[in-house]
Amino acid sequence: MVNKQAIIERAKRINNIRKQRLEKEREVFMKLGAKLRAYLFTGILVTAPVAITFYLAYKFILWVDQLVNRLLPPQYQLDNYFSMSVPGIGLIVLIVFLMLVGMFAAGFLGRFFIKLGEWFVVRVPLISSIYSLLKQIFETVFSSKTQAFKKVVMLEYPRKGIWILGLVSADLKGEVEAKLPEPMINVFIPTTPNPTSGFLIFVPKKDVIEMDMSVEEAIKFIVSGGLVEPKKKKR
């Protein structure tokens, strides 16, 4: 009887030791799996933006090459001068062409033809509206004298207690400003992950908090969904 009881106790100890060993092995594998997943996500975060950027740049260069090649007359197409496809040749041709157009437009004769072309365009009902809008956007974006957005602000939107980042374009003026009871500013609210889309709201100046971060830092913060935090300014 004693021998049988001892055998049972010994079997229980062996089972307990085996269970403890299995639990430790499971914990080790779980920690290893968690580390591997963390390494995988870190690798994706590091390589994905660079890879996607180079891929999009490569696709854009090829698209420009094909576009420029189609626009050229058959006897002047790039394929006639290069035995193999050289990415970027079409882009270089396009840049040189735009520079030549800019040089021509800067002269008296160029300005005359531009004024003449605009005079015809603004008299076409639908096309005039599209042309005016696009011209204003491009002048705002490419002008060195003005900035598209002045500063970054934080405001409560869409209700009290919820905060959001916005980009101030200018103080509100004109008819809209005259109809409102207090000084307001134009605030563009960009969306994540595409900051080029969003909506415009009119906000009282007293209801916004000005931020120290730059517009570029704010856009990076918005695009990344809050992952890329702006650097703190030294005071």
Image (cartoon, grey):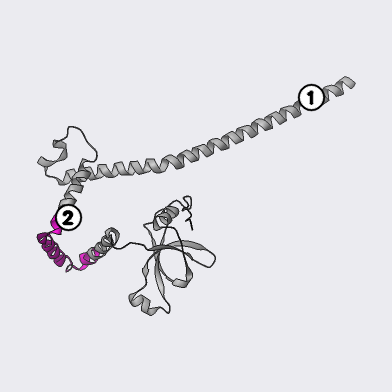
Disc on res. 11: 1
Which of pointers 2 and 1 indicates the residue nearer the eye?
2
Q: Which range of residues does the magenta coloring cover?
A: 103-130
Q: What predominant SS class does the magenta segment belong to?
A: helix
Screen quadrant of the N terminus:
top right
Disc on res. 102: 2
Rendering coords of residue 171 (x, y %): 37, 71
- The residue depicted at 16 percent of the width and 49 percent of the height is 97
Is residue 39 visible to us here?
yes
Please tell me which of labels 2 and 1 falls first in the chain: 1
| Magenta stretch holds residue 224 | no
Rendering coords of residue 223 (x, y %): 42, 53
Q: Identify which residue, 215 or 193, lies in the foreground.
A: 215
User: Dividing the picture into quarters, in which one does residue 146 lie?
Assistant: bottom left
Rendering coords of residue 18 (x, y %): 72, 27
Rendering coords of residue 5 (x, y %): 86, 24
* Residue found at the very far top of the displayed protein: 3
- The residue depicted at 44 percent of the width and 41 percent of the height is 46
Regarding mark 1 in the picture, which secondary structure is present there?
Answer: helix
Residue 87 falls left or right of residue 164: left
Q: Is residue 59 above or below residue 2?
A: below
Number of numbered tags placed on the structure image = 2
Q: Identify which residue, 209 or 77, lies in the foreground.
A: 209
